Amino acid sequence: MGEQELFWVMSPVIVLASLTLLFARKAVYVLAGMIVVMIGLAVFYVTLEAPFLGMIQVIVYTGAIMMLILFVLMLVGVDQKESLRETIRGQRWIALAAATGLVVLIVTTVYRIELPIRDIGGMNDGGNPQVIANALFGEWVLVMEILGLVLISAAVSAIVLTHLPRSGDRRSQAERAEERVRARLNPVNKPMPGVYARRNALDVPAIDPEGKPVPASISRVLKARKQDKDGSEWRAIGKDEAAE
Amino acid sequence: MTFESPIIEWAPLAPVLIVFAAAVLGIVIETADPKVWIRRRLQVALALVATLAAAATAALQWSVLDGDGTRVVVDRIICDRHSLIWMVMIAVFAALAILLFSSRVGGDDAFAPLAAAAPGSEEEREASEKGLAQTEVFPLALFSVGGMMLFTMVSDTLILFIVLELISLPLYVLVALSRRRRLLSQEAALKYFLMGAFASAVYLFGAALIYGGAFSTSFTIIDTAIVQYHGREALVLVGTVLALVGLLFKLGAVPFHAWTPDAYQGAPTPVTAFMAAATKAAAVAALIRFLYLAVHRFEWEIAPVLWTIAIATMLVGTVAAIVQTDIKRMLAYSSIAHGGFVLVAVTSFEREALSAAVFYMLAYGLATLGAFAVVGQVREVTKDGSLGAEATRLGQWAGLGRRSPWMATAMAVFLLSFAGIPLTAGFIGKYVAFKAAFDSGGWPLVVVAVLAAVVAVFFYVRVIVLMFLTPVPEDLKDAVEVTESTGPSLVVGITALATVLLGVVPSVVLDLASNAAILVP
Amino acid sequence: MLSVTWLAIAAPLGSAAVLLLGGRRLDRWGHWLAVAASTTSAVVGVGVMADLLSRSDRAVQQHLFDWIPGGELEVSAGLLVDPLSVSFLLLVGVVGTLIHVYSVAYMEGDPRRRTFFAYLNLFVAAMLLLVLADSYLLLFVGWEGVGLASYLLIGFWNQNPPFASAANKAFVVNRIGDVGLVLALGLMFAHLGSVDFAGVFASAPTASEGVLTAIGLMLLLAACGKSAQFPLQSWLGDAMAGPTPVSALIHAATMVTAGVYLIVRSGPVYAGAPTALLLVAIVGAITLLFGAVVGMAKDDIKRVLAASTISQIGYMMLAAGLGPVGFAFAIFHLITHGFFKAGLFLGAGSVMHGMGDQVDMRRFGGLATLMKVTWVTMGLGWLAILGVPPFSGFWSKDRIIEVAFIGEGMKPWLLGGAALLGAGLTAYYMSRLFFMTFHGKGRWTEGQHPHEASALMTVPMIILAVGSAALGLIFAIGDSFVTWLEPVTGHVTHEDPVLAVPVIMTLTLVLVALGIGLAYRQYALLPVPETAPVASLAVQAARKDLYQDSVNSVLLEYPGQTLTRTLVFADAKVVDGAVNAVAAGTVGLGGLVRRLQAGRVRSYAAMMLVGVVVVLGIVILAINGKGWF
């Protein structure tokens, strides 16, 4: 006992979390929702006496895959939003009606069926990981090999679609600096932000030798979130002068 | 806890293993990164040898097969005559498709020189000038081929799913690799991928429900569970319907067909040919195994569904094909209709249907490969006089008979075979398929099928009329050219000859197919 | 000669292949190759007949090769040489060869003459395969082959859009008939276990009447499609768009009579299906009147002949529908009709040739003196079709009228009456054609100089005219033709018709004379207006083919025509090269499909989801209440 109660507590959580996939506008929220779903599944596995699977679920999905996706999102830009406006007429209603229909059909069928309680005692004799290992490398070994092939083709496919070989030779730093000078661009690095006595956070710009703020020194991300400051309130010179 | 080593019969797996080994070897060659021309030659040779060797090995298996079949992995993967004949067919289709993959027109093959470069970008132009080639297509195709061959032996819902993914993944990518009209190609691939993922999800849901009802993924056990576990068969039935959706998706049956025209049109033509011929054959093989071994006791329950789908598929495919003005799209819809025709046979649940389906898919696959091979040869001529994209608008095919009598004649043979005109393979195929359905009382289905076939004659003959009876329009005189490169010409020749031979003397193959009409549970 | 029967098919087939593939270098002499191939068929036909006459068993089956072996269904490709098929072999061979020769001159100067001859040869090969086949399946091959050749030849001048659409119309209507044949094949196999003639006929007597009736009706549907019988007659008039030799060979003498052949050949099936047989006779009777009425109102010389063909085939169907007693006369009339109708068509072609492709009879007139050969040959054909003794039609058609009067109850009166009335109508419209063309004042358009055609054209016409005049008499002496066909049709003791034979004969001749007289008064003595006068509703209806197209479009062809129009529209667009065929797709059914296939992947997914729900719903509904739960 306890298993059923846990199920009824966890499943609404999982369902709600999975709804973020449909309704959240920001990819990060979707990701967070998915992490909740994955962890919830892991809890189910553990309560169903599949602790190994539960652990693997957390380590592989939550730990590795979700983090990987998060990294990708950060590279692409966390500030991107997805439009949820529906452009196809009637699409929402059709989708809603069909989905409801599917749920009703399956639930009414499954609900009317009495499933026997299977005795799975003794299934984990010798240790849960060992049992799984025996299955994977015994009866299912060929399938594991096939999965290996699936992975190879997936990896090669990904490389084919994304890998751009470097065209031309690699340029040295000196060459690149020279180019910048020739192009009359700023030849030196951008200054670090936040160099005030009273505030050294990343959201205030650096000041150039003339005492003017350098907006380029603030991270793009902060600007996009509108979290950047112009730094005037912390300046040694009075605000009015800076305004001139 | 002691480990018991599994009992696996490796010998029947040999054809599949050959293909997989070649695929992996192909990847190894890619990693060594030799010069383009070496790479391409190695890959083509490897792929051709592997597919032909696989066909030969599978044929050899046939002669040394013990009894009706061998259980490769208990009751999960089973090699019998029926799977062997499919394997040979798929391997031969693959070999022909590889010939198309390898063909080059004006030095360019059908694939993007550098798939990662954005369409129209500087990198793309550079890659094209340097003569780069995405030779990974060969090992990728081989992975898919190996999966398809394995598909015909699988008797387990879980393995079926994994192999389905092995077949699909490389295909998604191959669709995206067209050299010309790349945005169309990438869009097609994305659509195919999304719809494929959706279908896989539905299948998986179905497989889970089946497991819930039968406590097993093995076809044999599902079969007995349906009668044994009274009260749970409804669960298995619902699961069956959902799993069928996943398989019917691959076959392109209505209403799960919507991806087909887009994917077929956007994909590089050799890939279209490969998908239309080999994937469809594999899908039919797996569908038959699933229906006939696992859930045939539900015959009465799922027959209405299959009938509805078969009728809808034939009608939608035929009607939509009529209004197409792009030859690739027309052939795509026609392939949907053909999926419906083969379903007519499959729904009969008769032993006869096994051989009928084999013959039908052979006839259809050969004509399809040939037809797309011809499509790949009809090119637009750009303003500077070089060869451009394929001329797929029907109007551009006017007077093709005058430009290239042989190509046009072969195309006519394929179209007549599609139409089911006597003395072509397609006629015999339709005949045996409809007969199988008719014998089991499926005459309404046959009536619809015959009507659809009759209407279909229309658009096939229209193309023939366009090719032979319509003069070349003045403004298109120099705008279209038919190249006759070796690889595709070879494919066209072989398939045309086979199409006619199968129509005139189908006896040999029909005999083989009826010999193979046995499924080992 | 029997052993080389296959050569009759192979020679034209090979020649067609050579002509199609040979390219321009054959342009100069290719047509003579075609003539030679057709002549070969005719010579083989003569030889085979001689061989057959010297044998005691008059049916020889020749095995060619195994086509579909093994299992429950074994079909081998083979030829059946018996009096029936040899009669056709000779008809197709001889008339075909004459028309080939005629075409050499007629198609002179056409840039695609070689292709034309290739199709013509293809047709001969397919037609011979149709009649020589020893199984329904092989017959079907020929059946489709002649359909294809006919389609290609009707649309031969397809640069003219109406011609192309005529070809499409023929194609669609013929496909409706083909469905009948395919279903008949299926029924035969399912219930009689065989599709070859020998097997079917052997097991037919044991089958139930219901099955045989179903097969009979399906075969009738097939025959109606191919032979332009009511209600599938609409295509033949439009098919006149093809070159005139094609109309003569395919749409008068041979292909359109294939339906009659099919019925007669299937005699043993109909023996067990009296209902189906009666329907054949009724269809024949309706068609013969229909064709005659339409023929009376048309002004286009070829369309009058087409209507007449429909009507005459109606006679043959009527005879075939009378059972074994009529089979022989159906074929008898078929052969004589083949000669005189081909002759009439070639005559019409010669007139058109001389009048600069004019087809309106109101613009002819007074040609008798200028085109003497044509006048005489068409005159002989005219007398033959009218059934004036001693010309061919008298021996064949009047016998049909006679046997139509055999039977009990209302049937002989109705069928016989129709046949009798048809004879009168035929006399009227054929005389109308003859007088309007050759007599009265010349009503030619400016700048026309009617002239006689070259010998290449006139010689075939003369030979056919001689055939029209004499063939009937020759065949009728001692009932030789009927006796010759007996191995196929069976020997039937002649019953007496409900009216005495001399009475029928007199009545027929009186009606014919009346028809000629009326036509003579109206079209030879009185002036003929150059444009059709406003006429009564009945005549207007007849001019419009008794509204067959409207009726068809409502009842039969609505889906077919929508498709045809879509196709023709798409075709025109495609051919013009000015393609925005997206517009074409919005027409009719295609529009719906396109809306579903708008390229949006989410719509696709929705479609799929709806599909899943629907199929799941069907299944769950089906198991509800089965006590599964």
Image (cartoon, coloured by chain):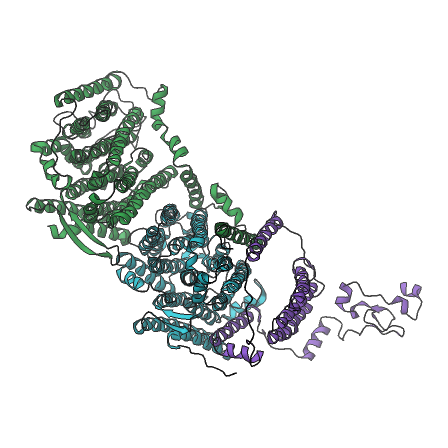
Relative placement, left or right, of B121 versus C49 is right
Q: Colour of chain A?
A: purple
Q: Position of residue C313 (x, y in %)?
A: 24, 33
Q: Which quadrant holds residue C550? A: top left
- Would residue C232 be seen by someone viewing this image from the given angle? yes
Q: Position of residue A213 (x, y in %)?
A: 84, 68
Q: Position of residue B517 (x, y in %)?
A: 33, 63
Picture residue at 26% right of the left edge, 17% below the top = C522
In this orientation, which residue lies closer to the viewer: C373 or C327? C327
Relative placement, left or right, of B69 versus B267 is left
Location of residue A54 with respect to B431 vertically, above or below: below
* Outermost residue to the bottom: B2
- Would residue C531 be seen by someone viewing this image from the given angle? no
In this orientation, which residue lies closer to the viewer: C287 or A206? C287
Q: Position of residue A69 (x, y in %)?
A: 65, 69
Q: Which chain is green?
A: C
Total numbered labels placed on residues in the image:
0
Relative placement, left or right, of C276 versus B85 is left
In this orientation, which residue lies closer to the viewer: B201 or B111? B201
Q: Colour of chain B?
A: cyan
Picture residue at 45% right of the left edge, 74% below the top = B23
Q: Which quadrant holds residue C357? A: top left
Q: Which quadrant holds residue C151? A: top left
Location of residue C624 with respect to B224 vertically, above or below: above
Picture residue at 10% right of the left edge, 39% below the top = C484
